Every structure is written in C-alpha cells, then in structure tokens.
Image (spheres, coloured by chain):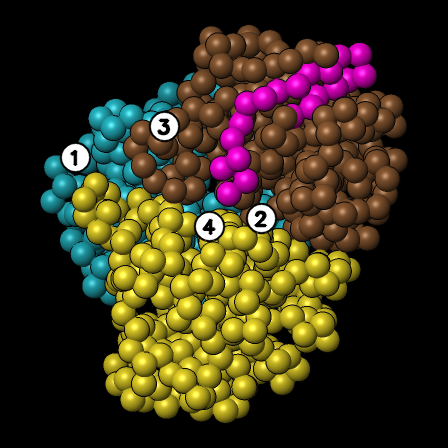
Chain colours: A brown, B yellow, C cyan
C-alpha cells in the first residue's frame, strides 16, 4: 500500500474510461469521482478509440454484457494496449454462462490487463474455463475454500496473465507473483448492496490511472480503501441507524473522505 | 399473506433473473438484495437460456423496451416455462405505444406468467389491447374508477391469463380468481420517486422464487411488504426530515428491515 | 426568472420524454419527478413518435450515445418539431470524439432546439466543431476563460441556433439574444457527483414543458432552482455531516422542496 496515491488521484484527476453495465454505472461513476478521478462511460465502437486516447485507464466490466458492447471492449482494450495505458478487467458473472466465459477467455488472449479483479467463483472460472458461478455472486461451494487454495489460484492466474490479481472476498488476496498481500477490511453487509465489486474495479482504475508506474501498490491501496470505507460506513450505520441503502450512501461518502493517514491507521494488510 | 415467506427468502437466497430497464435497474437489484434474494441482470440472447436455468424466478419489465431486449425476453420466458420456473410480468407503459401494447400481447400469447403486476392504466391496456396510458404513470382518467370496476378488471385478466393479477394503486388488488385481497398500505409519496413499481415486481420475483408453490401468498406478501415499507419510510421521513430522495433510501432500508412479525402487525389486508 | 413556473409544473405534471444515458437516467427521472413533472424514458425507434406525441417536452442527452439511440433521437426530434413541442439538447461530452461532435452538428442542422445546455468545453465544441473536451467534464483550459468571452460564445451560439443557450459553470450564462442572465448559485461540490448537468437539462424539460410560451424564463428558473438547491444542500450537509453521496440525495430533496418564495429569496441573478 502507498497512502500517497490517494493524494495523487486528487491532484491529477485521471480520466477513467469505463465500459460497464447499466445496473451499477451510476455508483461506479460516483465512486471514481469520490476518489478524485473523472469517469467517462462510452461504449460506442465509433468513439472508444478516441476516448481511450484521452483517458488514463480503461475498465472493462462484463456485467450486462452484450454483443454490441463486447465489440467495443475488444476495440478499446487493443487501443489501450497500443498506447500502453492500464486496462482493468472485472469479469462479472464469468462462469455463469458459456458466452461470458468465452468472451473473458478471448479478452485474456487478446488484451494485456494490468489488473484483474473478481470474486472466487469468477476467478476460478477464468482459470479453468469452467464455471460454478451462481449469477454474479460467489457460489457457497467456492466460499468454503481455504486461504491457501485461494492464494494458489491467484498465483496460477498471475502466471497465466501477468496481471495483478485481486480475488475479493472476506479476505482480499492481491498478488503480482512477487508480492502477495491479504486485506482483512470490509464487512459482510457489503454483499447486501449491489455494486461494491464494480465500484472496487472502478476505483482501481482511478488509482492505477494516477500512478501507472505503481500498479501493484495502487491496486492494494484501492482495495484497502474500499475495505476501510466499508468498515467506517458500518460503524456510522450502527451509530445513526438505517438499512442497506443508507449503508450504500455512507460507503461512497467514505471513499471520498478517507485520506492517507486514516487509511494507514485502519488498513489491515498482511504481507506474505 | 404468509409472513414466513420473508424468512424463507433470506434462508434460500433465490437467484432472480431480471430483464429490465436501465432507469431503475439499480433500485431493482438493491430491492431484491434487501429482501434476501440475489439479483442477476442479463439480457443478451446468447446467455439468457443459461441464466434462466440457474435462476429461481424470471422478471420481465417492459420499461426502456427495445427490439434487442424483446427477443431476449421471449427466449427467456419460453425457457422458464419449459423449466416450470415462475415468470413475472411488469408491463411498464403498456398502452402508451402500439409497439409496447403489441409486445405485451404477444408475450401473453406465448408465455405463461405466474404473476402480472401493473397500474390500472397498464392493466386496462393489457385487457383491451388499447391504451389510455400516460407514459409510465396511471392516467388520471383511470384513477377515477371505483373499486368494483378495478376488481372486475382483475378478474377478467385472471380469466384471460391464468396469472395472479396485481393492480397496484392507492389500494392494491390481488386476485387468483378464487381469492381476492385488497391491500391498503402505501403512501402517495411513492409516486414522487421512480422505481417503486419496478421494485415491487422485482421483490415479487424474490418471494415467488423462494416459494413457487405459494404464488398467490408470495405475491400478497411482497405487495404488503412494499406498502408497509412505504408507510414506515414516511413515518421515519416525518421524524428526520428530508425530501423524496431521502424517502427512497428509507424505503429500500425498510424492505430489508421489516420482518414477518412487523409485517403482520402493520399490513392492512382486506379479504373479499 | 418567474417563480410561478414552479407551481405550474406541480399543477400540470408535464410528461417529459428523455432519450438519455444509462449512467444518470435514474437521477434524471427522480429530478423530473422532484420538480413535479412525469418522466418517460423511451429510446426504441418504433415508439418514439408516439411518446413524443404524448409528451410536453423532449430532452436529448448525448451521454452514452450509440448508433441505435442516435437514430431514435433524430426521429423523436423531428416529430417534436412537427408538433411544435419544445426540445432540449444536452450535448454531453461533445468535442471529446468525432462521432459525438458530428452527431451534435447534424442534430443542430436538422432539429430546432428550444434550449441547448452544456458546459464551456461542450458549447465551444458545438460552436467551432472542434473539441478540447476532456471526457464529460469541462477542460481546465476552458475554465480559465473570462466571463466576457463566455457571454460572447453564448451569443454566437444563439445566433447560429436560435435556441436559448445555457453555458453552465461557476457562473451560469443564459441568453436568448435579447436577454442575458448570469446565475451565481451552485457549489463546486456539485462536480464531485455525477449527474448534476443531466439533472439540470431534465428539469429544464419539466419547466419548459409546463410553460412552453416562456422558454427563456423557464430555463432561467430551472437553472436557478438547480443552483439554489445546490447551495441549500451544502448548508444542510455542513450541518449534518457526510460526503458527496449524502450531498447528492440532499440535492434531489431540495429540487422538490424549494418553492417559488424560497427560490426568489436565494437566487442570485444578474441581468445584463
């Protein structure tokens, strides 16, 4: 983790290009703004090349995937690779259908990703090409896996992709092959609202976009920021009362309010 | 009503497949999560069959309908019928345009729905094939109808479709031909935010998905839950202050917080 | 400004047809409802003619533009012109890509708009056909322009388009050639959430839809309402605490709560 990255995003305001789903697009835009980036959602193939040229990072999110936007994702990803701009993959729901699994496989073949972030079921489907994914949430079967197995999966994916790998869960695993960090922040209530995973890949885009020379540190910092914000939002919710939608609003508030000092104080990161 | 259904959703976490509009998709996903279900939005025709195979219920919502998603709705609906999974129809805006009215008519011809939920204008358009719908809200003309007429419309639609019929309004009418329940919960402020109708059909999907052998009871319970949550949210709003967007957040909070005992205490259901 | 317009929207409930982006569609719908209008989002070319026939105003928003919805925008705009219904253009991100700039140019050639609202970068791109737009936010370069230059740009655009021109920013410039008003309400925190610009064009649709004989006054009133709501939301946020997402919710609340008297008291409008 590098707490200074939070400041860098706010001073540089990196433009983050997101080709994403319509369910959580608003939350993703607000999350990028909260950390100090500037989001632009554009999925028309006639303009993605130019948007990529303007942006500091590209985020491809496979939720509500369709044949039209898939073509835009390939075009945008190739362009970003040409221009050496970081590309983040959020393989939402991969493993649930052959279409999604196949598109994800082709994306991995054609695009070099800087970061890939998914839950255990999605990441297992990426690794094996086969799915036990239950919709967009991790399957219960997969959640039972022990930490050693999850780390082994992360390493295996890193070897295959040369991307920083984030496997999100009660403990988030992040590895770049050389370094592996485990983050224990975050709360189970985060699974009671939609969009926390999508927001995480979006703010990874913001932080990596601001500091592309520090992809691993940016990814760890973004993941810790989401977890710490989740912790603080629950503390606040317990104080003021309310349910999951109040929690969601607090979570985005904290993505904006947590600064480097607070992040450092609250982040629980184990370095393996 | 069967208050135990609320617990069943939370223990079973039914997967609810929604093919829905991009205006309220986020609210619908959060509403399904709030009641304990797991939402998955997928509208690509290449994958809807598999998503239907994984899910416990399918919700088709005609808001922001387009030719691409219409094809996916027919495919998903047919597959759900084959697999005997419950399908819920929310005929948003039917009657406003020939396209919408015709698509709704074809859906009724080809798909067997477990539940159809709409406002008085939409349901009249479904019954007659002609519309006085004013956009997506009930027309003032239709709102003047007396309760007897609305009940007669519900019975007529039930005869035509063999679906549980919900006509939402100041009083919600629910019938399966044999039983007719009238729910008097809910507040007029609910019409000042977008998405309350869409959230209702979404949580009907959640409850029916958890208890497909109790379609009528699940539908009554979901409708009562939405109304009671609306009542409690207004009481809270009056206490803490704020406008319609604060109300919207409270409403989703209560969808999560209202348990069987509270629902039973607050539901105002007249059995005819 | 004409404070009576706020009442007229609430008594007339104008139907506002929005062809808009999926990022802020929910906020736009809630904003239209907050001021007293009734929003309908419909972008399928087979039905836009009929929706336009039902509506009081049409809003075309170029965010997440694609080839399919572009066709619907042209069809809807032409129909609205035929029926002499007001059309509002929000040229989101114009200048960022050739596709967007070209579509905007063609829209200006084929459709007569009642109001065009954009930030300085978007409006400069409209005027010159060339862009320095940085994604969807105004570029820093453009923000440095002095007020006289911005007013000159507004006048030039008015001459080219015969539309009421709104250039939003720290100071909002509104002109119809004969009259030019400068509004100083609004807060920089509004740029930390997505959708304030889209909500502004949406409520302009609501107010112009209710009083099409007063396009300039409606536009000034809507812009002042957004600014004053932004001011009041920040005062409230400072009182209760919270971050940008709490602010967003307060902002929509105030769009509903600010009445004519409060608007008049708080609006800072300079008439040139």
The residue carrying mark 3 is A236
Q: Is residue B93 above or below residue A263?
A: below
Left/right of residue B200 with respect to residue B12 in the rendered view: left
**For the residues bearing labels 3 and 1, Cβ distance under 8 angstroms:** no
The residue carrying mark 1 is C266
Mark 3 or 1: in front is 3
Q: What residue is shown at x 58% (from left), y 55% (from top)?
A: B12
The residue carrying mark 4 is B34
The percent coordinates of residue C69 (x first, y second) are: 60, 57
Whether callout 2 and callout 1 share a subunit is answered no
Q: What residue is shown at x 47% (from left), y 56% (from top)?
A: B7
The percent coordinates of residue C46 (x first, y second) are: 59, 71
The percent coordinates of residue A81 (x first, y second) are: 80, 27
Left/right of residue A272 with respect to residue C125 in the rendered view: right
Q: Residue A22, labelled with which disc?
A: 2
The percent coordinates of residue A72 (x first, y second) are: 74, 44
In the image, which residues are magenta? A172-192
Q: Is residue B41 above or below residue A159?
A: below
Whether callout 2 and callout 4 share a subunit is answered no
Which element carries disc 3, helix, strand or loop? Answer: helix
Q: CA distance from mark 4 to mark 3?
A: 19 Å
Identify the subunit bearing mark 2: A
Identify the subunit bearing mark 1: C
Q: CA distance from mark 2 to mark 4?
A: 19 Å
Mark 3 or 2: in front is 3
């Amino acid at each position: 983790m590098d707490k200074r990255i939070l400041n860098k995003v706010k001073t540089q305001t990196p433009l983050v290009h997101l080709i994403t789903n319509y369910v959580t697009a608003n939350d993703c835009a607000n999350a990028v703004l909260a950390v100090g980036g500037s989001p632009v959602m554009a999925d028309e193939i006639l303009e993605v090349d130019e948007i990529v040229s303007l942006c500091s990072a590209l985020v491809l999110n496979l939720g509500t995937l369709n044949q039209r936007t898939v073509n835009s994702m390939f075009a945008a990803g190739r362009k970003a690779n040409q221009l050496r701009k970081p590309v983040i993959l959020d393989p939402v729901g991969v493993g649930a259908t052959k279409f999604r699994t196949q598109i994800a496989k082709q994306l991995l073949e054609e695009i070099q990703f800087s970061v890939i972030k998914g839950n255990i079921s999605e990441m297992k489907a990426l690794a094996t090409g086969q799915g036990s994914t239950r919709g967009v949430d991790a399957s219960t079967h997969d959640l039972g896996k022990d930490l050693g197995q999850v780390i082994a999966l992360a390493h295996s994916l890193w070897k295959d992709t040369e991307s920083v790998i984030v496997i999100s869960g009660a403990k988030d695993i992040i590895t770049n092959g050389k370094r592996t960090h485990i983050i224990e922040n975050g709360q189970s209530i985060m699974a009671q609202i939609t969009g926390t995973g999508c927001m995480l890949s979006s703010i990874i885009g913001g932080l990596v976009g601001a500091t592309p020379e520090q992809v691993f540190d940016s990814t760890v910092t973004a993941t810790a920021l989401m977890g710490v914000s989740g912790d603080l939002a629950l503390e606040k919710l317990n104080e003021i009362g309310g349910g999951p939608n109040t929690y969601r609003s607090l979570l985005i508030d904290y993505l904006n309010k947590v600064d480097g000092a607070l992040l450092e104080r609250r982040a629980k990161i184990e370095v393996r």
